[in-house]
Structures are given as structure tokens and as C-alpha cells.
Amino acid sequence: MSTRRSGGRTVRSAGLAFLVGILVIGLLASPIPAQAPKPGGTLTYVVSAEPPSFDAHRETTFAMLHPIRPHYNLLVKFDMPNYPKVVGDLAENWTISQDGLTYTFRMRRGVQFHDGSPLTSRDVKASYDKIIFPKGDVVSVRQATYEMVEKIEAPNPTTVVFRLKWPSPSFLANLASPFNWIYKADILEKEPRWYERNVMGTGPFKFVEYVRGSHWAGVRNENYFVSGRPYLDGYRALFIRAVAAQVAAVRSGQALIEFRGFTPAQRDDIVKALGDKVVVQEGGWLCNLLVVFNVNRTPFSDARFRRALTLAIDRWGGSRALSQITLLGPVGGVMRPGSEFATPDSELVRLAGYGRDIGAARAEAKKLLTEARVPEGFEFTLKNRNIPMPYEPAGVFLIDQWRQIGLRVSHVVQETGPYLADLRGGNYEAGIDFSCDFMDEPDVQLHKFISADRSPANYGGYTDRVLDRLFTEQSRTRDPEKRLQLIRQFEKRVLDEKAYQIYVLWWHRIIPHWTKLRGWKMGPAHHLDPDLQDVWIAD
Amino acid sequence: MAASITITPRAQPRPRWLGWFIRRYPLGAVAGLAILTMGIAAASATWLAPYDPLAIDFLAMFSRPGPGHWLGTDAFGRDVLSRMIFGAQTALLVGFFASLAGATLGGVIGVVSAYFGSTGDLVIQRLADILISFPLIILAMAIVAILGTGTVNLIAAIALSFVPRAEIIVRASALGIRQTPYLEAARALGAGHWRIIFRHMVPNVVAPYLVILTAFLGQAILLEASLSFLGLGVAEPTPAWGLMLSGAAVDFVQRAPWMAIFPGLAISFMVLAFNMLGDALRDALDPKLRT
């Protein structure tokens, strides 16, 4: 016993001496602190789809943002390490009037476009005029988000003023949309759609080349307005569609990261192969899957039937299991779990389909089916996208859950184009829909649920003026407490009382990346990544 | 009063065919037995399968093969054996109807084309040449892309891709009998085109038809599995062997290899069995190959 203790002391002493030695050698050998950003190198990363066009004002997809975003700046942006804090990008600072109707932005000086011309407030006004007041055949998908804007002014080259029709608590965050790239006014004046097929911004990287089916490349902007940035010499976004090939690219070091997200199995695969060469960032994801019901079809027109369908789903059990095999995970209501306006679990369990006692919920569901005169074995179709992850497992899960209250469901899987056409055209009974946003903001997340004549994103076909009123009220309420109450009322009506659309689960974001990739912190939305300004590669 | 002549082939002593076939082609007989077993299993899946193939059991996710689940469970905790037994229904349903429809339609077109000849035959042959130049799976994928997914569309897609292949084989046999004396005789007696085709030509191409039918069965099962694997066949949660090989089976192949191994083996054995039976039938039915 004593011999063993003595031996242990010897081993501990030797170990301590070894560690101290390593530390001393390490300190002497490194000329700079270990965490100091190192300039140089080219970052390669995977993008799983190609951009439909190069114009962020008309697109909604990460496939356009991830390769092209590093060429541009925004007026203001989210400070990713401190999300959802908004900081200036091209704006140096700003003021908001007492009545909340005037936002005045002071621009940075010395900012140049990649062609060498200076950026002025005129460029910002022209870009936002294109987003908010598009003319002719110019498409702006976020036009409706800015319906509170009355006009934009550029009183001098360094000042931009937004005048609103009513105060909007979400306005500043809305300006930080990663899609609101600032374009050059002269170009927009001559050819408003020039940016759909061309690139020219003020961002940290200049455009080099786009080879369809292969890659998108950028090179460091030597005249970038942030001193010492970017750190990288350049970047190369590799377009790799097959998931297995994406994993292989990261595993082999051909790419250091994929900014959208991997499944738990893919994460494990990469971690197993790379060990401590890889680090995994995980967290909530501002994406979710929901089920939309066509209220113009019987019995989906009956709220009792829709409530029965949501009551049958064991979300808590499903979350525990599906989070092991899919991107799906957190149980949530209309706001992302963990975000500012999210309903805590203690209140969530009071909504239909969120209770912990699934047996009781299903008994109630069967009672509702009887009341709604829906026979045992009633059959309907569930339309779904042919994207395996996470749509397919969600479909399998839902069909199983509904079988348990005696319903028979056919799974109809379609290409995205026909699937969306069917949902938009009302050619469906129930469909798995999705929502992916760039920020936690009730105006953005609730927009999908207001009446179909006000929201093109509502495929349910219903009209509910109570929801519309609640939406408008919360959107214009500056008191956070009152706004929260309105959001809760909205949530209860959508998910419980009427069950127009119901959530399956929210997504869980998993990004395994090489340890040597530094200066990047994962946010809750894959749309917010990356501008690559602060990213660097360690040795 | 018109004279009536009935031409019948010379009566052959009927061999005890099944016994002869088993003795002469034991591998083919074993393959036939395997197919029969699968057919019985598929027909009695409701009674034979130990679990509901669609029932999710999250407490049993990734269970190893053992007493509770003989072939283990998948990522949703569904019993692999039960899904394989029910998957045999899908494989046989798609395989049988697709090959029957493809071989029959192709066979009829082949006989008609051979009988009438002329420009129509030329056009049909060039069309068949074009279609046959595409690999089977590419053709089936293209048709699925047009028709959409689902069991019925899958059957239609596979059947249509078989048509030109069946047409060419059957036409070749039909050409050989087009100028035979008994057809001339039927024609001389005033038999119409369709009577000659269906009464005299079709029965004489039954042997090659049966051979391609069995060959197509194996190919159809493989095609169904391939298309389902690619997400173009039947949709989850329908039990189908190809589907069982995709998705989570790929993602978790190291953690739960049984998810892929057993359906993979089932596909391999079934295709092998149909091919062996097809070869044996070809040899048995073709007089030129009999010694």
C-alpha cells in the first residue's frame, strides 16, 4: 500500500515536471500569444447548394448568402458573439427619435466599393429603396417586412434617415437582416437588376470567380475599411450537394467547415475521424418544422379535428428520440425555445399537444374525433418534401403518432417545386411546412400565421381577423411586457384553440469544424453566417 | 358450304414436368423454392411478422439482433424482421406487376410489329433501339421524374422501361414463325390479322416470354430497391427493402450495421433466385438448348 503511494507520488512529480517543461518550452517557442489572430491563408468551406441568383434582395436561401455574403456590407448587423445585439456595419452610429418614428444613421467615412468608388448615404438609400419600394420587374421578397417605412432620405453624404409611419420595436433588428446588402446607387440607377448576375460591394473580400458546380472564390479586399481585416487572404466555397461527400470533405480537411449544419450521426462520424482536430458548436436553431392543414377541406375545416391531430403528438418523447438521429430537437411554440419571447416549458405544457401526459392527450384526441364525426381509420394524405433530413423522419414520426388515435395517413413525398405549388394552390390536406428565419423577432415568426389574404406564407387558407389584430398590436407595442402578453394570446389561438398550423419540433444546430478555424461563433440562424471578416486560420 | 380444317400440332407425350425440372435443374428448383417461400411469407405477413412494421418504439431504438428482435431494430425502434417480411410484399407486388405489364406489353408490340413489318416495324424498332440505349435505371428514373413517386407510378415506370427490351426479344422469335406454313395456311383460310396474331403467333412466343418474365422479375425487384434507395420509389414509412437501405441505415451503418445488412442480403438473394430460375426456365423451355 505504502509502496504504491510512494510510486504514485513519483509519477505525479514526474508528470508535473513534464507539464511545466512543456509550458516553458511552449512560452519560449511562441512569438505571439496562442489566441492572437493570424493573418493569411485561404478558408475552404462547403455549401450544399448553388445560388439561384447573386441578388440578396430577391433571394431567401443560404445557398446565396454563404458564398456571396463576404463581398458585401450591411448598414447594421448582428454582433454574433453577443447576439441579438445590433452593431453598426457601414453605420458608425445612429439615433432614434423619442416617438420612435425617425431613425438617423451616421455613415462610416472612407468606405470604398471594390471598384474604388466611395460609398455614400446615396448608395444606402438606393439599396433600401430597392428593398422597400421596388419598381418595375424588380423582385424584393422582404418588401412586406418594411411596411412601416414611409420614406428614406439621404440629406447629406454621410447621413441616412428612415421615417416610419408607426413606431416598430423590431425595425432596427430588421435592418440587420443579412440579406440587406448595400449596392452601388449608380449601378442600380442604370440597371436595377444588374446585381442578379454580377457582384460589386464594399465587403471584406473581392469577387474572383464562380465556377458552376464547383466553387465560388473571393480574395482579400486590401482597401477594406476595418483596419487589419480581413485576416484571410481569400476563401473558396465548394459546392457539394451530396451529404456524404460534404462529411467526407470536412473529414479529409478539403474543407474546414460547413456553415449550415450536420446531423448527430454526421457529427459523430467527423469527431471520430478527427478527434481533437475538430471542435463542435451546438445550439438552438431558428428553424422549425410545422404541419399546415388545409381548412378548406373536410374535416380539416373543423377545429376539433385539427386539435385532435396536435393532441396526438408526443412532442417531448419525440424530441428525446429524434434529437439522437435528426436535426430536430427542442419543443417549442411560435418563438424559438430559449429566445427572448419564447414560452417557457411550464406554460407551454398547457397548450394542446404539449402536455406531458400523452395518454390523457390521446384520449382527449379520440373524444374530439368522435365529436367531429371522424370515423376510426379515417384516411388522409400528408404531403412532404423529398429532402431526407429532417423532413422524412418527421413524416414517419407524425404518421406513427396519428395512427395511435386511429387515423391512417398516406405519405406523399414530392420534389420541392411541385410540393410548394400544391401547398400554395391548396392542393393538399395536410402538409409538412418549414420556417427558417434570420432573427428571433415576433414580427418575423408570427407573420406566417396571420390570415392568408395578408400573408402569402400562410398556406392554410384561413382568415382570422383576431389573429391579424393581435399581430398588428404586438408589432406596434413598445412595452415588452404588453407585447409578450399579446404574443402569448396569439400563440394560444394559433396552436391550441384553432390549431390552424402546429409545430412538430424546432431544429438543433450542430456545426463540427476544424479547430484551426478561429474567430467564428455559431449563431441561432444559418442565414447569419458568414461575412468572414473576423475569421482566421491557426497553424 | 365452306370446308373447315383445324390444324393442330402433333401431340407430344406430356412429361412429368416438375419432377423432370427438379432433377435436371436443381439450382433452378432451389431458386424456385426460395421464391415460393418469399411469396408465402409476403402473403402471410400479417400473421408471420412479430411486430407491426410501422410502429415506432423509441425505447427500442438501434436494438441489436437478439431474442426480442431477431434482426434488430432501426433508428425508429421498428422491428427489422417485420419490416423485411412486409417489404417482401412491396418487392413482389412491384416486381410481379411491373414485369408482367412490361413483358406483356412489349411482347404484344413485338409480335404485332413482326407480323405487319413494313414502315411501322421499322419505326418501332428504331424507337426501341433508342430506348434500349438508356440503362434501365436511367430510363426508370426519367419516367418516375415525369409520373411522380408512389407504388403505382413505380410499377408503371419499371414496366415502361421493360417494354422495349421485351419487344425486341419477342419480335425476334415472332419473325421466325411469320413465314411458317401453318400461318400461310391460316391466312389462306381467311383468318384475320388479329386472329392470326393472337391465335397462332402469340402461343408460339410464350417460351421466350416466360423466360424474360422471370428475368424481369429479378430486375424489377432490384430496380424497385434502387429507386426506393434513391428516394424515387415508395415513401417511408412503407416497408421496402431498398428504402430500408437508405437514410438512417447509411447514417448509422457503423452503429447499427444490421439495418443495412439484412435488407441488402434479402435483395441479393431474391435477385439471385429470380436469375437462377430464369436461366433454368430458359434452358428447360428452349428445345435448342436441350440435349
Image: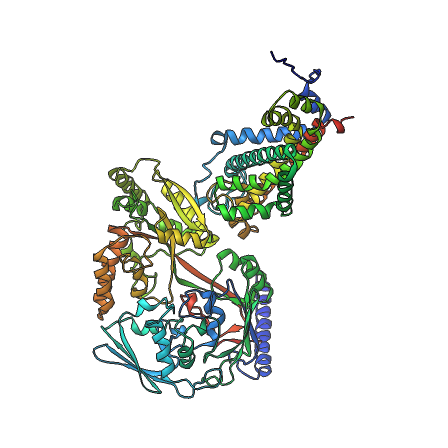
Single out the residue that lies furthest toward the right: B291
The N terminus of chain A sits in image quarter: bottom right
Residue B141 pos. (x, y %): 55, 48
Residue B229 in view of the camera: no
Residue A114 in view of the camera: yes
Q: Is residue B101 above or below residue A361?
A: above
Q: In this view, does A491 lie above or below A7?
A: above
Residue A241 pos. (x, y %): 53, 60
Q: Indicate the quadrant where residue A88 lies.
A: bottom left
Judge from the rendering whether residue A96 lies leftward or rightward of residue A423; answer left or right.
left
Judge from the rendering whether residue B243 lies leftward or rightward of residue B187; answer left or right.
left
Please, which colouring scheme is shown?
A: rainbow
Judge from the rendering whether residue A366 lies leftward or rightward of residue B132; answer left or right.
left
Residue A98 pos. (x, y %): 21, 80
Residue A124 pos. (x, y %): 37, 80
Query: Depth check: B144 or B20 in front?
Result: B144
Query: Depth check: B16 or A498 in front?
Result: B16
